[in-house]
Amino acid sequence: MDAQAAQNVGAQSTEAMRPVLEAQDIARVLTRIAHEIVERAKGADDVVLLGIPTRGVYLARRLAAKLEEITGTKIPVGSLDITMYRDDLRLKPARAIGRTEIPGDDIDGRLVVLVDDVLFSGRTIRAALDALGDLGRPRAVQLAVLVDRGHRELPIRADYVGKNLPTSLRETVKVQLQEEDGRDAVLLGQRTDTAAGQ
């Protein structure tokens, strides 16, 4: 999730937010994305899924399980920490460095699908591409997101989108996943902090 989106999340309690996706919707869109990956990749033989912490990692694991159901092939899945590649490091308080786990030998010559929960400004994905470049040279890189809320600041788009959710900058999107939050939902609400609209 973009840093700005994460900041937005903290600005409001979830009680005042309305659900736009429930658990069964999330399961359905992940199944659709898995089928789209198989179709576009013409199988899944050289696919590697890398989730962007935190919720992107859980989504990547779920996608890997669905891909295995569809193809009968175990799909390598890992995580890609982007902390040191962010362009807002000097603007925000220090944050803990997460874990990067590259499954298998490496990513050279593979189709890497980056997985994240919300696509917003595009800055998180730019950082992920920089981090990926230091790890190897994939054959191609694609992006799968659960929610695309618009407001791009960089020329980045997702190849696979669970839900396009047009939002205003005064709104906030929060993704909740069972593994982290005890439930699956995508919530939309109004920002209540003073930075709204900036």
Image (cartoon, rainbow, N blue to C red):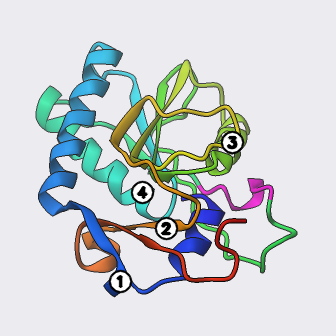
Q: How many marks?
A: 4
Q: Residue at x 55, y 18 (%)?
A: 139
Say which residue label 1 marks.
16
Q: CA distance from mark 2 to mark 1?
A: 11 Å
**What residue type is disc 1 on?**
Ala
**What residue type is disc 4 on?**
Val
Say which residue label 4 marks.
57
Left or right: 197 with respect to 32?
right
Q: Residue at x 70, y 76 (%)?
A: 195
Q: Range of the magenta residues?
A: 81-87
Q: Residue furthest right?
A: 90
State whether residue 44 is above or below residue 187: above
Mark 3 against mark 2, which lies toward the viewer?
A: 2
Q: Position of residue 164 (x, y in %)?
A: 38, 42
Q: Position of residue 187 (x, y in %)?
A: 34, 68
Q: Is 84 one of the magenta-colored residues?
A: yes
Say which residue label 2 marks.
172
**What residue type is disc 2 on?**
Thr
Quadrant assignment, res 8: bottom right
Say which residue label 3 marks.
126
Quarter in which the C terminus is drawn: bottom right
Question: Pointers 3 and 2 in contact (CB under 8 A)?
Answer: no
- Mark 3 Cα-neighbour bin, 10 Å: few <14, some 14–19, many ≥20: some
Q: Is 182 one of the magenta-colored residues?
A: no
- First in sequence, mark 3 or 1: give its number: 1
